Amino acid sequence: MADTLNRTSPITGTVLPQGRPYWIVDGKAYDFTEWLKIHPGGSNWFGPSMGRDISAVVHTYHRDPAKLQKFLARYEIEGFTEKDILPKLGVPPFLLDPDFDATKDLPRLDFRDQGSLLAAIRTAVNARFSKKDLRRYDRGFDLVTWLLVGAHLATLVLLLTGVIPAWAFVVLQVVTRTSLAGAGHYHLHRRWRDQKKYALPPLGKALFDVNYVGTSLIGTDGHVLLHHPYMGSGADVKKTFFDGMLRLHPVLRVPGYTLHKFGICLSGLSLRARELARFEAPKQGKAPLRIDFWIVRALLLAEFVACLATGHILAWAVQFVITLWFNTFLVVASHDFEDEKSEEEELAVIPERWRDDWAARQICLSYDLTVVGNRWIDLWLSAGLSPHRVHHVLPYQGSGFANLATEKTVRAVCEENGIVWERPRNLLFNRFPAVIRHYLFCPVKALPRPPSGPPPAGGPPLPGRFPAGPMPPVQVRGVRGQLGEFLTYAWDGVRGFGV
């Protein structure tokens, strides 16, 4: 077994590899340090995935992954095996089940370049749509995005100058923030070369933060590299993304989560960004400056300060709460994570021959969402989730417009292979009631507590700090205990802990 050292974050308890960089693909180890400098999709994917098995990412995030094989051999190394992958994947341990161990719990699904459902879908889409065709859809998507950016900023100016009433400001802000977060959702998945090669920073992906949920900073990893490849498994951090609020009594969840996210918005994410730069940078150098992230953070704070200074703080607070909760429920509405089903029950919707197929699971266990019934409008009102199934099976496509254009082709391949294409789920009347029942009314859940302080330098963890094993769940009981938990949870947002 390779000899590697660990770095531990003093805020989140994240354990990262130190020593020679390595990545595992199809059972073999590679050092991509040189490749990441010329990777057509940019280098930002490699830092978070160091020390992991990235086989699923390699096979599912490329239009023609078979072409990659000739590159892989150049970077193969000895001394590492599948047993060396990080048990907790290098993510904050509160996002994973305490018993999860990536060395044995990662799903083993079929995403081969030949013979899988993904291969059939990819072949059909590539034959019907050229890269040029899809880029044209992406450009149209980007045009609408920047028009929405202008509308969003204009709405604030119109409020501050008294042109529109507060209620109109609230409605328009909820719509534009949700729509822009959907644009950020797709930009986050795109190929991004190193920022220094661009005249402007990739602001699009930072728009994933504009709805106050705060996912651009951790989205490259938790969303793109873990949720999509490992959807529904123990490695899927989206399953537990908002579980922090479940440790509160139902009466305290709305105010507790709202205050937690207010703290995240004001200071928590900024502190988290500093932590990433200091503790999660590769050993070879510093983490790149996230100019796009800081621009959006400055915008959010400027909006808050402007409304506070001009007496419009109530309108700002109302749109903050509605936007936050609408988008929080949106994040979890596109999958059935609220029901505690056995794996057999979950897979019952998939034809038996396809139950171990990666693409079949993506299609059958994801929901498309509808709001007004027009897919192109619903794309924006649902934060990009109206063509959610196509997005999941072809995550490398750069826009919601490309997803909508290719949906007919993907659907045809699925139906040819006996996979039923379910109707979209109504967001307001079908999915929202289910997720509201779960997140606001389910009983208090015992969850791992955050670490109480940094580990001692050069020594073993102290009692109560960064236990050597998984953090044990803690069930808080009694009125005083719940009030203390409420205050702790709110403060966690200010200091950047939790999501």
Image (cartoon, grey):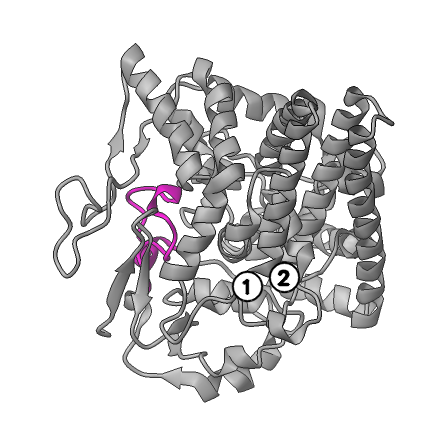
Determine contact: label 2, label 1, CB under 8 Å.
yes
Dominant SS of magenta comes to: loop
Q: Nearer the viewer, residue 357 or 335?
A: 335
Give the mark nearest the N terminus, 2 or 1: 1
Q: Identify which residue is drawn at 61% across, 73% down.
A: 196
Taking the image as drawn, is residue 164 in sight? yes
Q: Amino acid at mark 1?
A: Phe
Residue wearing tag 2? 118
Measured as percent of width and height from the top left, residue 470 is found at: 25, 45
Measured as percent of width and height from the top left, residue 358 is found at: 55, 56
Circle 2 crowding by C-alpha within 10 Å: few under 14, some 14–19, many from 20: many
Task: Specify the farthest residue to the top.
Answer: 479
Residue wearing tag 1? 111
The residue segment tinted magenta is 85-106
Describe the element under mark 1 as helix, strand or loop. Answer: loop
Q: Which mark is residue 180?
A: none
| The quadrant where residue 497 appears | top left
Q: Amino acid at mark 2?
A: Leu
Q: Nearer the viewer, residue 411 or 89?
A: 89
Q: Quadrant of the N terminus?
A: bottom left
Instruction: Work out whether 322 lies above or below 232.
Output: above
Check if residue 436 falls in the magenta segment. no
